Image (cartoon, rainbow, N blue to C red):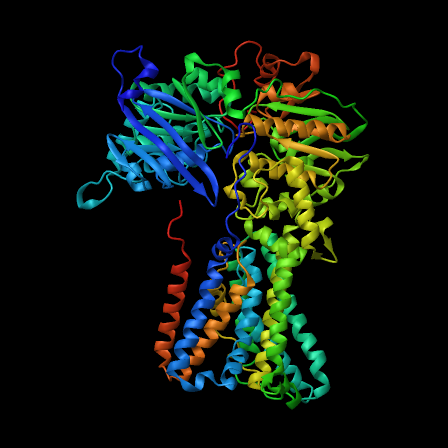
């Protein structure tokens, strides 16, 4: 395996290779998910894996964790060669993974979760709870989180960032030294990022190998040692991070350079579509007054739990309105998602898996779901009309592969998001509310969704876009409203846009962005 | 096959392979039916007589009616444990009214309508309680069933006579050797299958079963869909009650005992997911036919009633175990 040292001749002692994959092929029903992928991971390195959605990253991960057996190729771990792994074997070889969706049991304590698979046993073969807590604390200490996370706390009471650390500790408890982190930053509020990076650096220093997957290229430059680019199931390149740059990586990932991700503003602002006055929702949003016009993109900024999502949901009739009014086209706004959709207000929700898609159903089923009204006559659906509508949506938003009978859960995140967008655009809405429209999807799919948004505004549709990604808000919005603890704390016009200006308002600070808000939700009194 | 910049387009898998994979549970259940039928044809010569085969179809009607309703409810991710008691209260109410009306054949049509309305009313009650309280459908329908069991005991603990002769034709009327009710039942299976696959509300049932919140956010009226499902299952139960009345010729206080459980078994055998959102009525039909055929065969072979229970249980376990995919990552 040492023939690969050509990549890093600088250091005299080359750290051992923990894992190497050679010529891995995997086909699903005629589609090559992986064709001849080569990848290796050394002790004490962070090796980033990047590529568009559908490039094969998830499949590759599943080959390493043993969920999939490759059709061809060799997996080498710790000097042993395998044609394929199974989950049990992969775990015993030291492979651990932290996915975006955590595999934690919310009703159990931190210590119970961390040592779930192999709890320490005392006399009579019963679990030694004190020892379990001690071991949990030890693992958390290694991650520098022993002071913050109480081993007896129930996991459901932890913040997302803390839960992620518990996940990592859980992998360490199984003696994992090949750690796969699948978009760990996507689920984190930005203030938890530094802690995650510190944890990853600690693990690297301990000699673990870390496979780090992220769509945020800047993180890769901050954190990773090497980067491998996948595209259409092929390894495009493996490079030292220090010797590459963002444009090169993007070019490798998408096969073309993205000169400008954000299409220019080209729509004229029309009259007011929707207006709220002094809106109070649940006990989390207070006194929100806003206006959306035809043909504009209104950005909603704010930290997690600042009320953005609650406002988005309230506009389609979800959540209890405790005060104030919403008017739409000079009439009181509809009060249920069905009525709202009927009048042309649609919400493209955050978390497509939980709110956007029926995962075990086909692309066709999902695309036609909100359009059943147009596809029926006297309650009966006509397959031909449905097929035509679905075909049109697939071409309009460029879902690939264009296979309407494919099950939604088998599609990549980008394609899933396109289905959620597509199913609503088919209804010909007048006001589209996007909540985190591009979370966890690749640059190519992002660019396409931005183009769709511009197209909408050209047609005179009003757009509300709530997002935690500041570049996207700045690139797409005509105006940005900033939320803090359930209230609008500022409005910025295009000439005032800057990440600093938004963050200052969002954290309600002038200078220091730290130490401000302790928890994600609960507004302080 | 990959040129940079264009997406990979690979040929789709062969149609038959997809068909088999997507319909594995249905193929399995009908395979089992053929297996049982083949074995029975060899072991019991009177099994394959046309009269007996038609008999099996007629014997499958009661379970079929309950299972059709149960399928629609389970499709939404719920369950209706009150179907047997709804069938019973309809049978007892209609029998009582026949008796009170002096067994007048002119009462048949109005009383059938009354029976269906009584059934629909309890379905509406189930549906409204479930959508208003958001409590588990199992608990709600079980509670209603328990109340109805008491009411039924109050109506009568002995068979109620007085069903007009003409009403018995519902069970007996035949064209050649084929009972008319078998033909009507076949039509009903077809219509409800059409409804589940081609009607807007049928689609909504699947959507609600797949994910209630996604359905709600996709402009589906979830509450209305659920209420429709429970009204539908209760109307099916009412039809079963009316049919049983014509078979026994009396209002039997033991009407439809154990049918809730059997219908769930038939649905599960047919491969409809107990979590909702997945499955087909064709599978349920298979489950119903298999159960009806097994009990027919057991009777022909004079299998002890205790062994019948045991063997039926084994079939259920084997079938359900076979559905479990060998590996789910």
Residue B271, compared with residue A177, is above or below; it is below
Residue A38, compared with residue B157, is above or below; it is above
Q: A156 or B314: which is nearer to us?
A: B314
Residue A229 visible, this orientation = yes
Residue A151 visible, this orientation = no
Q: B210 or B235: which is nearer to us?
A: B210
Q: Residue B135: x percent and y percent?
A: 54, 53
Q: Residue A342: x percent and y percent?
A: 74, 44
Number of dots carrying numbers: 0
Q: Residue A166: x percent and y percent?
A: 37, 31
Q: Residue at x 38, y 17 (%)?
A: A225
Relative placement, left or right, of A395 versus A113 is right
Relative placement, left or right, of A418 versus A39 is right
The image quadrant where one finds the C terminus of chain A is top right
Residue B99, compared with residue A397, is above or below; it is below
Res A16 → quadrant: top left
Residue B324, compared with residue A437, is above or below; it is below
Q: B206 or B73: which is nearer to us?
A: B206
Residue found farthest to the front: B1
């Amino acid at each position: 395996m040492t023939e690969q040292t050509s990549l890093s001749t600088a250091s005299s002692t080359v750290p051992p290779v923990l894992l190497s994959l050679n010529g891995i092929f995997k086909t699903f029903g005629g589609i090559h998910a992986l064709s001849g992928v080569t990848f290796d991971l050394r002790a004490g390195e962070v090796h980033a894996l990047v590529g568009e959605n559908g490039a094969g990253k998830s499949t590759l991960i599943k080959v390493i964790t043993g969920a999939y057996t490759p059709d061809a190729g060799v997996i080498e771990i710790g000097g042993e060669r395998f044609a394929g792994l199974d989950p049990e074997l992969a775990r015993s070889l030291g492979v651990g993974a932290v996915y975006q969706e955590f595999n934690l049991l919310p009703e159990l304590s931190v210590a119970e979760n961390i040592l779930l698979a192999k709890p320490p046993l005392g006399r009579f073969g019963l679990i030694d709870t004190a020892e379990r807590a001690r071991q949990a604390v030890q693992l958390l200490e290694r991650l520098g989180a022993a002071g913050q996370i109480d081993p007896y706390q129930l996991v459901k009471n932890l913040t997302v960032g803390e839960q992620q650390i518990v996940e990592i500790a859980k992998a360490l408890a199984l003696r994992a030294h090949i750690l796969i982190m699948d978009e760990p930053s996507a689920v984190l509020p930005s203030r938890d990022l530094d802690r995650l990076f510190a944890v990853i650096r600690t693990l690297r220093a301990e000699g673990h190998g870390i496979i780090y997957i992220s769509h945020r290229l800047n993180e890769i430059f901050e954190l990773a040692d090497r980067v491998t680019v996948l595209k259409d199931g092929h390894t495009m390149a493996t490079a030292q991070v220090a010797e590459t740059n963002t444009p090169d990586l993007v070019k490798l990932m998408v096969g073309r350079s993205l000169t400008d991700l954000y299409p220019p503003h080209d729509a004229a602002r029309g009259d007011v579509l929707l207006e709220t006055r002094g809106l109070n929702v649940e006990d989390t949003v207070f006194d929100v007054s806003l206006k959306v016009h035809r043909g504009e993109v209104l950005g909603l900024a704010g930290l997690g739990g600042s009320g953005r999502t609650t406002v988005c949901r309230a506009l389609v009739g979800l959540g209890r309105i405790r005060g104030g009014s919403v008017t739409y086209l000079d009439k009181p706004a509809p009060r249920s998602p069905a009525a709202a959709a009927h009048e042309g207000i649609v919400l493209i929700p955050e978390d497509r898996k939980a709110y956007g898609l029926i995962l075990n159903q086909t692309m066709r089923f999902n695309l036609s779901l909100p359009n059943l009204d147009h596809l029926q006559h006297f309650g009966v659906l006509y397959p031909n009309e449905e097929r035509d509508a679905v075909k049109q949506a697939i071409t309009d938003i460029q879902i690939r592969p264009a296979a309407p009978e494919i099950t939604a859960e088998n599609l990549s995140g980008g394609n899933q998001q396109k289905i959620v967008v597509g199913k609503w655009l088919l209804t010909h809405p007048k006001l589209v509310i996007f909540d985190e429209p591009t979370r966890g999807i690749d640059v190519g799919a992002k660019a396409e969704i931005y183009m769709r948004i511009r197209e909408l505004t050209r047609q005179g549709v009003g757009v509300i876009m709530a997002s935690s990604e500041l570049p996207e808000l700045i690139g797409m919005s005509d105006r940005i409203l900033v939320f803090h603890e359930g209230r609008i704390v500022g409005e910025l016009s295009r000439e005032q846009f800057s990440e600093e200006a938004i963050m200052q308002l969002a954290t309600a600070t002038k200078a220091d962005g730290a130490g401000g808000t302790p928890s994600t939700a609960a507004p302080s009194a | 096959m990959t040129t940079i910049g264009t997406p990979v387009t690979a040929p789709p898998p062969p149609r038959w392979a997809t068909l088999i994979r997507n319909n594995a549970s249905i193929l399995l259940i009908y395979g089992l039916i053929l297996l049982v039928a083949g074995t029975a044809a060899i072991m019991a010569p009177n099994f394959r007589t046309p009269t007996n085969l038609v008999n099996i179809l007629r014997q499958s009607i009661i379970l079929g009616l309950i299972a059709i309703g149960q399928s629609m409810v389970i499709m939404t991710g719920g369950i209706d444990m009150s179907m047997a008691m709804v069938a019973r209260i309809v049978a007892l109410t209609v029998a009582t009214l026949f008796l009170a009306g002096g067994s007048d054949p002119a009462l048949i049509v109005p009383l059938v309508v009354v029976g269906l309305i009584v059934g629909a009313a309890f379905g509406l009650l189930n549906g409204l309680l479930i959508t208003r309280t958001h409590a588990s459908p199992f608990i709600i329908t079980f509670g209603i069933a328990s109340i109805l069991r008491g009411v039924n005991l109050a109506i009568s603990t002995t068979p109620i006579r007085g069903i007009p002769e003409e009403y018995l034709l519902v069970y007996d009327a035949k064209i050649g050797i084929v009972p008319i009710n078998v033909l009507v039942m076949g039509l009903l299976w077809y219509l409800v299958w059409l409804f589940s696959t081609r009607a807007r509300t049928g689609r909504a049932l699947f959507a609600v079963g797949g994910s209630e919140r996604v359905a709600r956010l996709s402009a589906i009226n979830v509450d209305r869909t659920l209420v429709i499902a429970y009204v539908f299952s209760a109307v099916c139960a009412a039809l079963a009650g009316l049919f049983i009345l014509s078979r026994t010729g009396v209002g039997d206080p033991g009407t439809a005992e154990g049918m809730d459980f059997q219908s769930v078994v038939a649905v599960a055998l047919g491969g409809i997911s107990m979590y909702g959102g997945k499955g087909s009525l064709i599978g349920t039909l298979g489950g119903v036919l298999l159960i009806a055929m097994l009990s027919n065969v057991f009777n022909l072979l004079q299998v002890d009633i205790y062994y019948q229970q045991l063997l039926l249980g084994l079939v259920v376990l084997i079938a359900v175990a076979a559905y479990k995919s060998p590996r789910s990552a």
